[in-house]
Image (cartoon, grey):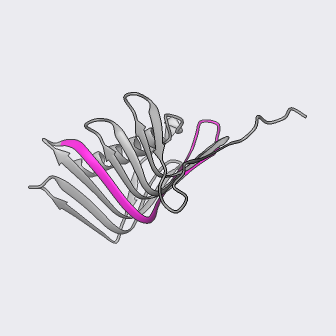
Amino acid sequence: MKTLKRLGFALVLLLMVHSLGLARQSDLSKPIDVRADSSEFDEKAGVQTLSGNVEITQGSMKISAEFISISLENNALSVIEGRGNPINFEQENEAGELMRGEAQTVIYDARNGTLILKGSAKLSQPQQDLTSEQITFNAETQKVSAQGGGSSGRVSIQIQPPKSDR
């Protein structure tokens, strides 16, 4: 049960960091439901793995992946890595607007507070879309950086104009 609690905390943290603090706070008090084709915990190595159609929900938060690995060091969260084709996540913000993201690989390093979305990474928030080969968010500095790559080799950002009062 401790591992499941760590998993839930880690995944909520992953999505909250990803959504740049705009996630629905009430989701944190909701139960976490995890479903996968298989789950294994290697107590000696401190690694929990979920594989095959992994689905995680908590309130409005939804994560789907093919594989998620959670590593612990000294019984503390160390690294979460998820892979998918792609890995998808979504959550409502406080205004009820849907935020979405996807990437081939997601790596959250709890030791230094960085979240990396790799491989056709996309982040869609209200009024802004970001597409790049790699997107990195540093929770400590509150900075997002994106690096181009892939076929275009460029970062793409689309910002919506303010809504008209008309």
Q: Quadrant of residue 87?
A: bottom left
Residue nearest the viewer, comparing 106 with 31: 106
Examine the rendered structure and indicate whether residue 25 appears above or below residue 123. above
- Residue 82 highlighted magenta (yes or no): yes
Question: In which quadrant will I find the C terminus?
Answer: top right
Residue nearest the viewer, comparing 46 with 8: 46
Extreme-top residue of the structure? 141
Q: Is residue 60 left or right of residue 40?
A: right
Q: Quadrant of residue 40?
A: bottom left
How far across and how far down the image is residue 113, in percent? 33, 36
- Residue 121 highlighted magenta (yes or no): no
Q: Residue at x 39, y 33 (%)?
A: 139
Q: Residue at x 64, y 37 (%)?
A: 95
How far across and how far down the image is residue 92, in percent? 58, 44
Extreme-right residue of the structure? 166
Q: Residue at x 52, y 63 (%)?
A: 151
Magenta stretch, residue numbers: 76-100
Residue nearest the viewer, comparing 47 with 4: 47
Examine the rendered structure and indicate whether residue 73 appears above or below residue 89. above
Q: Main secondary structure of the magenta part?
A: strand
Q: Is residue 29 visible?
A: no
How far across and how far down the image is residue 23, in percent? 52, 39
How far across and how far down the image is residue 91, in percent? 54, 47
Q: Is residue 23 left or right of residue 68?
A: right
Q: Residue at x 49, y 36 (%)?
A: 20
Q: Is residue 33 visible?
A: yes
Residue nearest the viewer, comparing 15 with 55: 15
Q: Is residue 131 left or right of residue 147?
A: right
- Marks counted in the figure total 0
